[in-house]
Image (cartoon, rainbow, N blue to C red):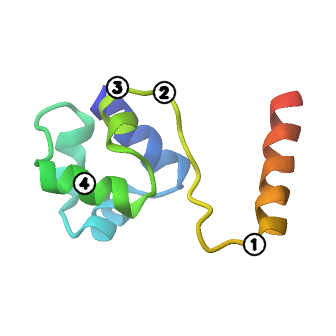
Amino acid sequence: MFYERIKELRLSLGLTQVQFGRKLCVTKQCVSNWENCNLQPSIDMLTRIAETFSISADYLLGLSDKLTIDVSGLTNEQILHIQAVVSDLKNA
């Protein structure tokens, strides 16, 4: 499941394997190995990936399908705007 989620995350952000690797300070080959299920990241790297992209490790590992959005630092008005956009997308 991890290999599918990591590729899905990278593509959803419009990043190449090289760009994705740079964000995490790893090589393109490392990202390629994750995406092809040739190797798994360390626990420390899994934590870094989750923190860098504001997602849960549970989501990356396939233990949860729930994605959350980090809205810390936003005003209540900004959060309401985000909720409205999400609601519109669900109803589209």
For the residue marked with disc 2, what is the amino acid? Asp
Number of the front mark, 1 or 3? 1
Number of the front mark, 1 or 2? 1
- Which quadrant would residue 68 be assigned to in this image? top right
- Which quadrant would residue 72 be assigned to in this image? bottom right
- Considering only vertical position in the picture, is 6 above or below 66? below
| Precedes in sequence: disc 2 or disc 4 | 4
Q: Which residue is mark 2?
A: 65
Q: Which residue is mark 3?
A: 63
- Closer-to-camera residue (34/90): 90
| Precedes in sequence: disc 4 or disc 3 | 4
Label 1: state its secondary structure.
loop
Q: Which residue is mark 4?
A: 47
Label 3: state its secondary structure.
loop
Mark 4 surroundings within 10 Å by alpha-carbon count, few (fewer than 14), some (14 through 19), many (20 or more) = some
- Considering only vertical position in the picture, is 36 above or below 50? above
Label 4: state its secondary structure.
helix
Q: Are marks 1 and 4 in contact (CB under 8 Å)?
A: no
| Precedes in sequence: disc 1 or disc 3 | 3
- The tag on residue 75 is 1
Coordinates of residue 36 in the picture (x, y in percent): 22, 33
- Considering only vertical position in the picture, is 22 above or below 38? below
Side of 54 where 84 appears, left or right = right
Q: CA distance from mark 2 to mark 4?
A: 17 Å
For the residue marked with disc 4, what is the amino acid? Thr
- Closer-to-camera residue (51/8): 51
Label 2: state its secondary structure.
loop
For the residue marked with disc 3, what is the amino acid? Leu
Q: CA distance from mark 2 to mark 3?
A: 7 Å
Q: CA distance from mark 1 to mark 3?
A: 31 Å
The residue under the point 39% across, 45% down is 56
- The tag on residue 22 is none
